[in-house]
Image: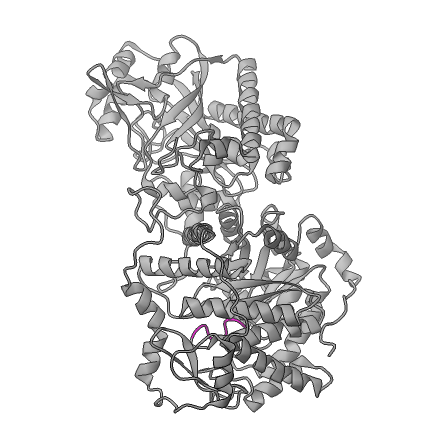
């Protein structure tokens, strides 16, 4: 039976702009082929917002969540049903949309959104849920996107009342459009359907059948989906059956398996949701799947935030890493799931053979005759006679198969071929009719199981001080326990060579500007009071309470008594809050390029900070191109950084921008980490945020004399989602004002005795800043996490050498 169309040729239109957009980026299919060859599990969220800038920021947030992530652009409901006028009206009136209106935004906007986001390490897929996908496929292809998902059955029966025959025609056209995109990829949603209470054999059958349909219409790269169900052992059996059947029937195709974290009623508690997510990661690893689409702890309550998606991705990656220590699952052979799925598939293939091998016609006929029948599905083209049930162990079985060519099996099933054959010949007494209360109990089975269970953790937390719910960054985001492993890693060596060039460029540049390098103190009677929950480290200095330096700010001002322009590369220790262990940009021990300039204004200090960053990038590009390439750093975004001056935005304007995006942000406080990351993700080059409100920063940041309540300070934010690089300000230098500011901050001026004595005698006005050396290294090298820029990383809460 000739079901798979030969390779299609690229149309003339395809050789224009969309081809150019794709030319510099490996395809989604190529990315997955590399991941599959390396044995890497790719984790991916469901995520879509209407605003292109915010969508870009979300993708960048996911991109920097770990080294094995894929991006998602999930579309809105209007676009899914083809009501593009309604989507346009929503955009024009500022109404909320529950996804990205790809067709209305058009290819130019979407291509700009993807610029600098998609690269060799980060592909992007469109997810939509449409039975009329032609416009979606065309818009995605025009924007340079080459991967999506769906199917004529799986994006019809669960989502609306579009006739199945119409959906088949629509998806035939869509597949042929997508087939003209080089190395395009299409994922079937057939392994999910309604999300729950569908026995695995039908999910497996539909997943294989839709991939055969894709192949018949020219698609050469496909993924077969399977949604986690109610019993982990049955899920392993099902994925093994899916793999076996794909190997038998999808010959000549590039294919992989993708697991969906449970798509039914989700646990409401954070611990329950996390446990279910981790179970899906174990399923993916043990079954040999190549990709996992995650759910978050917010699933039962609302649409998740970007931060919650990142938390889920890291939790899934960490669980996957731990699961690799477990013996892989052994294919049981001709299991019950396999035999049932094979019977369903071949019933449809037989129909196709009777109608010129037309799988689309065969699928429509199979549903019309009840040979395929989704339990509890209300679509008019679904027979609706099949029913399922849960046994005492949580396994899903058929209680009524209707006209499907299989037999129901009451009681606990066996995975042996013999017991599966028995189901074909022995009809046991049917179970009692399903009541509404029984259905509700079944629908909430997984929620109740995970919310009420208190299982012992499968592995200890890396640090007992961190609750299990937060001790979950992926291993790639957690420092290795072995110093030898970290320092001998070629990636570490490449990173430290880049850092060496940054330090050398900085020293040369500041020396040329007349700065004197000083060696900073490590301990002292007082240090920067800090902020955002960080704590200081006490030291017993011969019976006197000293502090490890959290910042050299006070000592930099003192150093101007010797020189007018000074800098140092200062070590700092701050015990950051435990929740910062998953931000990818916090260390408890780090280094700062600290600069102070006598008589300078904020603007002069900002100009020096900008020149340091630009100079460091130029030096690294000139000296370390091999190291950047080895780390996979895309250097194209640096062109804009080097060509144009950095932008400036006030704190008030940044707050307004965030609120326009629908995000909460106080006008009287520091910009929250998540919001800062979003602003960073929107930017094409570094930018300064100025004029923070009084009370949001330390007493040493000078208050404006013309705008009381506003500070003469700044942060320097990197683009691409990397976040804050530097913080600085003009300094308070008049004794009376310093004392007043200290008291306003709630501190006792007496603790700053030596500093106030110096100020009473007179110090110069100045401006200065500190650039985080590890953060600057992370940005320039394109690292996933800031700890990778440290030879001996100290991540908050993680005990290490």
Q: Residue at x 50, y 26 (%)?
A: 609
The number of discs equals 0
Q: Residue 739 location, x and y as percent?
A: 24, 22
Q: Residue at x 38, y 17 (%)?
A: 556
Residue 512 or residue 542, whichever sits in front: 542
Residue 281 or residue 523, whichever sits in front: 281
Q: Residue at x 30, y 47 (%)?
A: 467
User: Which of the 4 image quadrants contains residue 351?
Assistant: bottom right
Q: Residue furthest front?
A: 418
Residue 456 in the figure: left or right of residue 477: left
Q: Is residue 531 visible?
A: yes
Highlighted range, magenta: 189-196
Q: Residue 618 location, x and y as percent?
A: 62, 28
- Look at the magenta stretch and give its main secondary structure: loop
Q: Residue furthest top?
A: 562
User: Which of the 4 image quadrants contains residue 391?
Assistant: bottom left
Q: Is residue 764 above or below residue 448?
A: above
Q: Colour scheme used in the picture?
A: one colour
Q: Is residue 45 above or below residue 137?
A: above
Q: Residue at x 79, y 64 (%)?
A: 9
Residue 437 or residue 408, whichever sits in front: 408
Q: Is residue 85 visible?
A: no
Quadrant for the C terminus, please. top left
The question of residue 630 being in magenta is answered with no
Quadrant for the N terminus, please. bottom right
Q: Residue 3 location, x and y as percent?
A: 71, 76
Q: Is residue 285 above or below residue 187?
A: above
Q: Residue 731 location, x and y as percent?
A: 36, 22
Residue 461 in the figure: left or right of residue 168: left
């Amino acid at each position: 039976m000739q079901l798979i169309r030969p390779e299609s040729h690229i149309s003339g239109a395809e050789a224009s702009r969309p081809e150019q957009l794709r030319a510099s980026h490996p395809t989604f299919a190529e990315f997955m082929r590399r991941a599959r060859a390396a044995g890497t599990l790719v984790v991916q969220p469901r995520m879509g917002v209407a605003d292109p800038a915010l969508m870009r920021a979300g993708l960048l947030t996911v991109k920097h969540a770990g080294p094995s992530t894929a991006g998602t652009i999930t579309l809105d409901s209007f676009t899914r049903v083809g009501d593009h006028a309604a989507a346009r009206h929503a955009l024009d009136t500022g109404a909320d949309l529950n996804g990205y209106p790809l067709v209305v935004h058009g290819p130019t906007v979407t291509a700009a959104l993807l610029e600098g986001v998609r690269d060799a390490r980060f592909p992007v897929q469109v997810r939509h849920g449409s039975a009329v996908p032609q416009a979606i496929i065309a818009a995605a292809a025009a924007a340079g996107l080459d991967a999506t998902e769906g199917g004529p059955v799986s994006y019809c029966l669960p989502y609306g009342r579009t006739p199945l025959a119409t959906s088949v025609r629509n998806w035939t056209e869509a597949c042929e459009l997508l087939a003209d995109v080089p190395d395009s990829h299409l994922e079937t949603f057939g392994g999910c359907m309604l999300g729950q209470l569908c026995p695995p054999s039908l999910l497996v059958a539909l997943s294989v059948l839709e991939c055969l349909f894709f192949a018949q219409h020219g698609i050469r790269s496909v993924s077969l989906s399977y949604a986690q169900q109610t019993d982990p052992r049955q899920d392993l059996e099902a994925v093994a059956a899916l793999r076996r059947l794909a190997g038998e029937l999808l010959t000549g195709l590039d294919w992989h398996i993708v697991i969906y974290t449970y798509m039914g009623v989700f646990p409401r508690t954070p611990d329950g949701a996390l446990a279910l997510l981790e179970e899906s990661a174990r399923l993916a690893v043990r079954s040999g799947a190549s990709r996992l689409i995650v759910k978050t702890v917010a699933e039962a309550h609302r649409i998740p935030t970007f931060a919650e998606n990142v938390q889920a991705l890291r939790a899934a990656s960490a669980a996957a890493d731990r699961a690799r220590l477990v013996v892989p699952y052994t294919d049981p052979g001709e299991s019950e799931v396999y035999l049932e799925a094979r019977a369903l598939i071949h019933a449809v293939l037989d129909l196709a053979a009777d109608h010129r091998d037309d799988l689309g016609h065969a699928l429509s006929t199979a549903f019309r005759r009840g040979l395929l029948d989704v339990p509890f599905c209300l679509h008019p083209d679904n027979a609706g006679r099949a029913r399922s049930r849960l046994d005492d162990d949580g396994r899903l079985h058929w209680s009524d198969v209707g006209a499907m060519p299989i037999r129901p099996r009451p009681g606990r099933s066996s995975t042996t071929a013999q017991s599966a054959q028995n189901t074909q010949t022995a009809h046991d007494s049917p179970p009692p009719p399903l009541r509404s209360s029984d259905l509700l109990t079944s629908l909430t089975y997984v929620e109740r199981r995970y919310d009420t269970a208190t299982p012992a953790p499968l592995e200890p937390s890396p640090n007992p001080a961190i609750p299990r719910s937060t001790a979950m960054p992926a291993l790639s985001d957690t420092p290795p326990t072995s110093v030898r492993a970290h320092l001998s890693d070629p990636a570490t060596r490449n990173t430290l060579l880049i850092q060496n060039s940054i330090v050398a460029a900085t020293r040369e540049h500041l020396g040329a500007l007349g700065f004197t390098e000083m060696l900073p103190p490590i301990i002292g009677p007082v240090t920067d009071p800090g902020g955002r929950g960080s704590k200081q480290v006490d030291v017993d200095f011969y019976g006197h309470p000293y502090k490890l330096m959290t910042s050299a700010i006070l000592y930099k001002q003192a150093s101007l008594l010797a020189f007018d322009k000074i800098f140092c590369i200062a070590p700092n220790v701050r015990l950051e809050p435990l929740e910062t262990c998953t931000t990818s940009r916090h260390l408890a021990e780090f280094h700062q390029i600290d600069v102070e300039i006598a008589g300078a204004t904020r603007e002069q200090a900002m100009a020096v900070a900008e020149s340091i960053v630009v100079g460091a990038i130029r030096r690294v590009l000139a000296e370390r191109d091999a190291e950047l390439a080895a780390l996979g750093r895309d250097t194209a975004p640096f062109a804009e950084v080097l060509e144009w001056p950095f932008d400036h935005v006030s704190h008030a304007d940044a707050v307004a921008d965030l609120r326009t995006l629908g995000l909460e942000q106080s006008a009287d406080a520091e910009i929250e980490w998540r919001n800062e990351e979003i602003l960073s993700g929107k930017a094409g080059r570094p930018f300064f945020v100025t004029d923070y409100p009084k009370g949001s920063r330390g007493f040493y940041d000078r208050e404006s004399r013309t705008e009381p309540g506003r500070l003469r300070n700044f942060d320097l934010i990197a683009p691409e989602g990397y976040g804050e690089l530097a913080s600085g300000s003009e300094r308070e230098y008049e004794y009376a004002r310093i004392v007043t500011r200290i008291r306003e901050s709630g501190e006792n001026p007496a603790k700053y005795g030596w500093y106030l004595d110096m100020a009473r005698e007179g110090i110069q006005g100045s401006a200065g800043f500190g650039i985080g050396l590890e953060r600057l290294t992370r940005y320039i090298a394109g690292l996933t996490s800031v700890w990778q820029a440290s030879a001996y990383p100290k991540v908050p809460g993680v005990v290490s050498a």
